[in-house]
Amino acid sequence: MMPSSTIQSVPCPTQRAILGALWYFEIFRHPLTAEEVWACSNCPDVSMAAFLPQLDALVESGQVFVYQSFYQTQADPDWVSRRLDFNRRADAFLPKAHRMARLIGAFPFIRAVLVSGSLSKHCMPPDGDIDYFLVTEPGRLWLARTLLVLFKKAFLLNSHKYFCVNYFIDTEHLEIEEKNLFTATEVSTLLPLYGAEWCERFAAANDWRRQYLPNFPKRPILGVPPHGKPVVKKLAEWLLRGGLGARLDALAMRITVGYWRRKFRHFDERTFDGALKSRRYVSKHHPLYFQQKVLAAYAKRMQANIQN
């Protein structure tokens, strides 16, 4: 149950930002450490030293609870054990993600590989997948996507567990077009694993995220391998240059989007475009439309605390 205190009883902007950050991650029942609360709070120009007393004041007032070293607005200590279990599982999945990223990076036209979703936040639920965010060569995005999907079907028995390639952009369209708290959080937490130079360019193109998360630290690139072209990849890209590659890319897009249109015919146009955005330069396959669900839940949470 939410505490009786409301956002109106917290005049300090920093405290409002703290509650907003906690409410957002509590949609996932995910408590935060003090450092994470600061990183996820929209309070620019507030140092960690100035931030901590405001967080302590919320604890003292009973609006925020702290269990072990984790903060939340719900009086439910079980959330901490759940998070720690997810963290331990993430530790086991990360080496697999690194190995798979190197494999994905060896495919034609792949320029960068980043981990998204739960694992990018160092969490992995029991039924979770490793989600990848990929950057491709312009004009070959759909061909690259199709090659990866065919590999998954042929050699991984269509398993999504360690190989969920659900978001592609190309190097000429690095800036994410949808700009909101959800996309800012996802962009900020992406974990670079391959193609260091393109990961850097992606981060620079999406500096708008600081409008929502001004304190969130930039993901380190140190140790991330640069984009390279082993012999087989270089040969494949040479063979698929020019008109042949362009025609195959257009065909791959037409077949894929046509299949999605039939499979998700119950989606209206706006929902389809939001959940399965399909352009020559971007492919997003999020049929559950998690972004919409999270933002709606967050808006409802904020409104409930304003009204109470």
Image: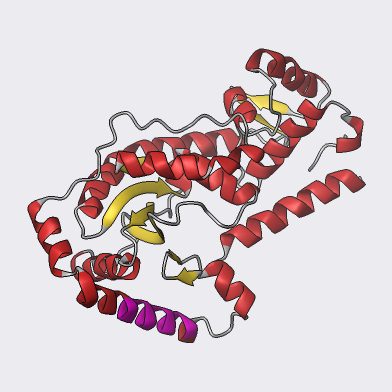
Q: Residue at x 16, y 50 (%)?
A: 229
Q: Residue at x 44, y 33 (%)?
A: 219
- Decide if residue 67 is in sight here: yes
Provide residue 63's location: percent of width, then percent of height. Answer: 80, 30
Q: How is the image coloured?
A: secondary structure
| Image side of residue 284 versus residue 246, left or right | right
Provide residue 225's location: percent of width, then percent of height. Answer: 24, 38
- Decide if residue 124 is in sight here: no
Provide residue 86's location: percent of width, then percent of height. Answer: 46, 40
Answer above or below: position of 136 versus 288.
above
The single residue placed furthest to the top in the displayed view is 49
Check the picture and name the quadrant holding the N terminus: top right
Residue 148 inside the magenta-drawn segment: no
The single residue placed furthest to the left in the displayed view is 231
Check the picture and name the quadrant holding the C terminus: top right
Answer above or below: position of 201 versus 134.
above
Label tally: 0
Q: Which residues are magenta?
A: 250-261
Q: Residue at x 69, y 17 (%)?
A: 52
Residue 253 inside the magenta-drawn segment: yes
| Image side of residue 293 versus residue 238, left or right | right
Quick one: 151 or 249, which is closer to the camera? 249
The single residue placed furthest to the front in the displayed view is 242
Quick one: 154 or 72, which is closer to the camera? 154
Q: Residue at x 72, y 28 (%)?
A: 65
Q: Main secondary structure of the magenta part?
A: helix
Answer above or below: position of 299 versus 267.
above
| Image side of residue 22 versus residue 136, left or right | right
